[in-house]
């Protein structure tokens, strides 16, 4: 089952199985800004199978990566990577070391939570450049009222109604633990948010909880359902900024990319990319 490993929010990685020693690899493809300019192309890491951000060479992160490259006068090589067990593994595989099976790291990685705790655990990377504020949301049928106030008030309906989540995600952990576990029997797990939304459309669920962008992408313009951001005191994290990461010693590259991003935000390019994919864009505070 595909799990929500792209997010840092569960706070702990899986206890890893032993891995074979790393075989010798060719010199890393990741380089300094001067090396990248000499090469003439920016190598950008994105996740595989992660609509609406990156899927089969298309998506928000892909287009933003291409726009950043163009802003710097560089060609863009977008490279897809499979998610590993947790965010720490992803940063290692995509940014500072490469995968033990041989995949080399990239110059910069997209879709990294800009978070001091995550940065503190990963001193071999520099996390920067918030470009979107992701939020936890609920898509629900019209007959269910607003998901507002305390959990006891907002979620009581799900002691009787089914709500779908992606397994091993923030939404999953929250719904299983809130209200002393009273919702457990009605929390239905899926391999992805899109799969859960499919069952919502089919009338088999009353609601789906997860990242708003993934819900919006899967739901499309289906007017039968309401999407709203989850706001209740029991949910300690309901939003997080998405940014980028480079190797820790590539400060010049990070600063240059951050400057390019600011220009793309200022001229409306970033907002336009999200709009083309039907996703509500929220610019993070710097």
Image: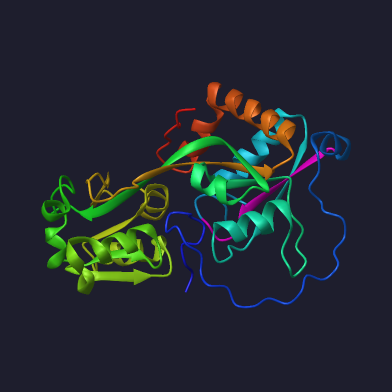
**Where, by quadrant of the figure, is residue 258 drawn?**
top right
Give 200 or 50, whichever is nearer the viewer: 50
**120 and 104: which is toward the camera:** 120
How many discs mark residues in the rendered view? Answer: 0
Identity of the residue drawn at 48% across and 54% down: 8
Q: How is the image coloured?
A: rainbow
Is 147 placed left or right of 109 in the picture? left
The residue positioned 41% from the left and 47% from the top of the image is: 213
Q: Examine the rendered structure and indicate whether residue 29 appears above or below residue 182.
A: above
* Segment tinted magenta in the rendering: 40-50
Q: Residue at x 40, y 61 (%)?
A: 169
Would you say 117 lies left or right of 68 here?
left
Residue 154 on the magenta segment: no
Residue 223 in view of the camera? yes
Residue 5 placement (x, y as % from top left): 50, 62
Q: Position of residue 249 (x, y in %)?
A: 74, 40
Residue at 77% x, 58% y: name it.
104
Give the vertical position of 19 relative to 229 (above or below): below
User: What is the x, y in percent for residue 202?
Assistant: 28, 67
Which residue is at the front of the view, 10 or 38?
10
Q: Is residue 115 at all visible to an observer of this figure?
A: no
Could you say where residue 203 lies in the image, as x and y percent from the top left? 23, 66
Which SS type dominates the magenta stretch?
A: strand
Judged left or right of residue 231, residue 127 is: right
């Amino acid at each position: 089952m595909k799990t929500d490993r792209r997010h840092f929010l569960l706070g702990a990685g899986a206890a890893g199985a032993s891995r074979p020693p790393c075989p010798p690899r060719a010199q890393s493809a990741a380089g300094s800004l001067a090396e990248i300019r000499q090469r003439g192309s920016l190598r950008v890491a994105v996740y595989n199978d992660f609509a609406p951000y990156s899927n089969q060479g298309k998506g928000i992160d892909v287009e933003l990566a291409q726009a950043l490259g163009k802003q710097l006068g560089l060609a863009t090589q977008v490279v897809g990577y499979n998610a590993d067990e947790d965010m720490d593994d992803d940063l290692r595989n995509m940014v500072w070391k490469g995968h033990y099976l041989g995949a080399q790291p990239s110059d910069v990685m997209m879709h990294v939570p800009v978070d001091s705790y995550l940065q503190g655990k990963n001193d071999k990377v520099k996390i920067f450049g918030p470009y979107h504020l992701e939020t936890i949301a609920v898509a629900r049928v019209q007959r269910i009222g607003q998901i507002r106030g305390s959990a006891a008030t907002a979620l009581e309906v799900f002691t009787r109604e089914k709500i779908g989540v992606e397994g091993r995600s923030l939404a999953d952990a929250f719904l299983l633990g809130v209200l002393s576990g009273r919702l457990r029997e009605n929390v239905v797990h899926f391999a992805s948010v899109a799969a859960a939304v499919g069952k919502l459309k089919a009338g088999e669920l009353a609601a789906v909880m997860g990242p708003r962008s993934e819900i919006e992408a899967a739901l499309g313009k289906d007017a039968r359902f309401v999407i709203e951001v989850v706001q209740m005191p029991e949910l300690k994290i309901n939003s997080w900024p998405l940014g980028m990461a480079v190797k820790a010693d590539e400060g010049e590259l990070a600063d240059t990319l951050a400057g390019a991003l600011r220009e793309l935000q200022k001229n409306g390019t970033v907002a336009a990319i999200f709009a083309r994919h039907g996703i509500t864009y929220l610019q993070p505070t710097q």
